[in-house]
Image (cartoon, rainbow, N blue to C red):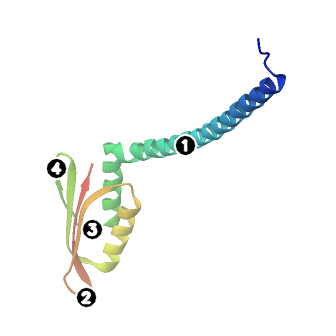
Amino acid sequence: MNRINPIYILLLLVILFSFFYFKSVNAKEELSATKDEYKEILKMANELSSLKNIYDNKAVQKASLQRILKSSKIDVIQQEKKDSILLRVDNMDYSSLNILMDRVLNGSFNITTLEIKKISDENANLQMEIKW
């Protein structure tokens, strides 16, 4: 019977050890990449949750819009629909328009349509639809 040479056994062990070592290094890299992806997804989920809380609350949006419209002291024609409100202002001067648009655009409103038509050098018409 032939005996197995100890050098072959040692060589086999070295090969197996190097194979498992490189596999474990690769697994660590994959784990690190997965952890980074998980942190990024968790951060995005938190952002989406906070945005949903801001844009989903109809009562807060309505109250905020009414507060803006009352403070602007402009005659606004409001047509409320089931899931939106249509605001229309005729013959509005540009400074009032600028103030109103600044307040509305800085708020958390879902503006679906916005139309501004120039009437003269100082006045314009505004039509805007805000969805709840």
Kindly identify the residue that appears in the image at 62 percent across and 36 percent down.
Answer: 31
Kindly identify the residue that appears in the image at 55 percent across and 39 percent down.
Answer: 38
Q: Secondary structure at mark 1?
A: helix
Amino acid type at image mark 3: Ile
On residue 55, which mark appears? Answer: none
Pair 3/1: label in front: 1
Residue found at the very far bottom of the displayed protein: 121
On residue 37, which mark appears? Answer: 1
Q: Earlier in the sequence, mark 2 or mark 4?
A: 4
Say left or right for 87 vs 2.
Answer: left
Q: Earlier in the sequence, mark 3 or mark 4?
A: 3
**In front: 28, or 75?**
28
Residue bearing mark 2:
121
Amino acid type at image mark 2: Asp
Residue bearing mark 4:
81
What's the distance in space between the residues labelled 2 and 4, CA to CA? 33 Å
CB atoms of marks 3 and 1 within 8 Å: no
Q: Secondary structure at mark 4?
A: loop
Kindly identify the residue that appears in the image at 31 percent across and 73 percent down.
Answer: 97
Q: Find residue 118 and report its image quarter.
A: bottom left
Q: Find residue 76 and report its image quarter.
A: bottom left
Q: Is residue 65 above or below residue 14?
A: below
Tell me residue 85's x, y (percent): 21, 54
Q: Find residue 82 and report its image quarter.
A: top left
Residue bearing mark 3:
74
Q: Is residue 54 above or below residue 23?
A: below
Q: Earlier in the sequence, mark 2 or mark 3?
A: 3
Tell me residue 64's x, y (percent): 36, 53
Amino acid type at image mark 4: Lys
**In front: 102, or 18?**
18
Pair 3/4: label in front: 4
**In front: 91, or 126?**
126
